[in-house]
Image (cartoon, coloured by chain):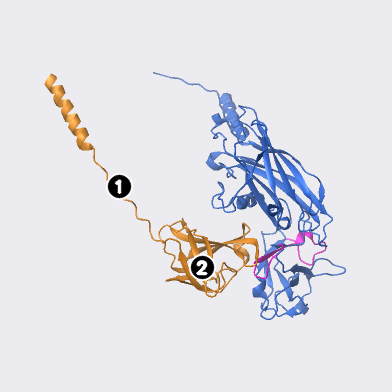
Amino acid sequence: MFYKVNLLCAVLLLMLWTSCKVEKLEPVNEAVKDVSGTWSILKVTRNGADITNTYDFSKFKLVFEGNNYTLENKLPFLVSDNGTFNLDDNQYAFSISFNPAGGSAKTIPFNFPNVNGNRQLSVPFTIVGCSNTNYVYTLQRN
Amino acid sequence: MNLNIRIKGKTLWMVCATLVIGIMVAACAYFVDGVEQPDSATAGSRITVKVKLRVQPVNVASGNPPWNSPIIFGFCVPRGWKVKEHDLKLTYVFDQGDGKPHPMSPVQDNAPATQPEGLTWAEAFKNQYGNGGNFVDDVEWVVYQTDNILGENGDSPRTGTITIDMMVGADQVNGGVDMLYAFTDVAHGFYADGANGVTFNTSGYYASKTKECFEITGGTSGETVNYCQPQRITPSPAKGSSNDLVSFTFDNNLVANSPFPRGGNTKLYMSMVGYAADDTELPLKLTQNVELKQTTGTSGKFLGTIWPADAFDTSNKPLARITYYITDNATVTRADDINKVGLQEDPYVDFAYLIRCN
């Protein structure tokens, strides 16, 4: 009986020892933030009020290609001229800068949420020279 | 084991009713008990406002989470006052705390609200309370928070007072404005009615009180804006540049003997003329008047948005003002307009929108 108990303990200890396995945790590689493509307006707020349905925003396009951006069918926006853009970090981006040709750079927080499987890009801005009114364009990729 | 539980129908209803009432009572936890504020003030002077808060004890047994986070406090004032640029001071005293005034901290402009998600705190207050009862969309929400919770007081209410020291009427504009004071807490924000199965009725983890039509007098700008009076036309923003997107809300209900029918699917339009600073008329680029859409089926309120810089040719001279009226005619030929509504009749005066930032 004594030996059976010892044998049982030994088997249990063996099982316990073999059950332990050092798990190798590998850091998840954060995806590069890719904004390339053509973006259209999904929603517009002015001072927090939704004005999307009060104006025809459908023709406006923001196109990111390579390091360049272009504006089509312009509207009041963060910048008014085409130029280059860059993220502060391609993987862990906190801000995006628009550098219009011949103008000064505008940097905004990089708000790039995944909504229902689709990326959205949020662009907050005020009108140059008249900063009382706050706008936020929520863009979606075509 | 045979366990027999017998509950009479009457008892069951009583228990259920008690639970439901318990949940509702527990949810109606936040109150603004009073606002001490003068009825009027001279433009550019300072006023002191005291807002009394109360939080009823939360009935943990009913399933509501205990309340234990700092206060988020917002109030609504005309943008032109620029209160944050004029030595604005907020302090709080919690009666169940040390009884001493403590400074409140401004909430960062981009700080996200707890509820609703996706909005900043200022946007969340606007989302909840709009323009605070004002009819001119040229007000801003100023948001501050306490460093501490409202104190502990067992099952008794917790109370406190927030004191605001601010300059009013810095823009020297006369008129009346509804002043709305509201608060919630950091943990809950504007918790949606019905969230987590809890129905809050009209109040929940937030509360507000309005000081109606506070009047500014003695302003030197020569301008009067009555924020607290209904307007035939409400531009938003009230002051903007030619590059702003400016919305106009026309309220046909406020026009006695309006040429436009009440209710129904009437189509209305804005007919505009743009002027430079020297009163030169600027060419209109639009080929059709701006359509105003009825906000809801038969509300009698019509809303449309323009981009002034795109509506007029400003290549030679900048736009200084727009005069306009509401018509039921889509064509830009003004001679065809039989029915039109402006600022007033007899004598007739057009509406006017000045292009200016402040």
Q: Quadrant of the C terminus of chain B?
A: bottom right
Q: Is residue A142 visible?
A: no
Q: Nearer the viewer, residue B162 or B99?
A: B99
Q: Chain of mark 1?
A: A
Magenta span of residues: B238-265
- Most common secondary structure along the magenta stretch: loop
> Viewed as shown, does residue B217 lie left or right of B322?
right
* Callout 1 crowding tier (Cα within 10 Å): few <14, some 14–19, many ≥20: few
In which quadrant of the rendered view does residue A65 lie?
bottom left
Q: Which mark is residue A25?
A: 1
Rounded to the nearest whole Å, what is the CA distance between mark 1 and mark 2?
Answer: 38 Å
Q: Which chain is tinted orange?
A: A
Above or below, B182 relative to B81: above
Q: Is residue B117 magenta?
A: no
Q: Position of residue B59 (x, y in %)?
A: 58, 30
Above or below, B252 relative to B242: above
Q: Are marks 1 and 2 on the same chain?
A: yes
Q: Is residue A103 visible?
A: yes
Q: Position of residue B193 (x, y in %)?
A: 59, 43
Q: Position of residue A86 (x, y in %)?
A: 46, 66
Residue for point 55% across, 30% down:
B60
Q: Give the residue pinned by disc 2.
A: A98
Q: Which chain is tinted blue?
A: B
In which quadrant of the rendered view does residue B101 lie?
top right
User: In the structure shown, which secondary structural element does the residue marked by tag 1 occupy?
Assistant: loop
User: In the structure shown, which secondary structural element does the residue marked by tag 2 occupy?
Assistant: strand
Q: Position of residue A90 (x, y in %)?
A: 41, 62
Residue for point 70% across, 76% down:
B318
Q: Chain of mark 2?
A: A
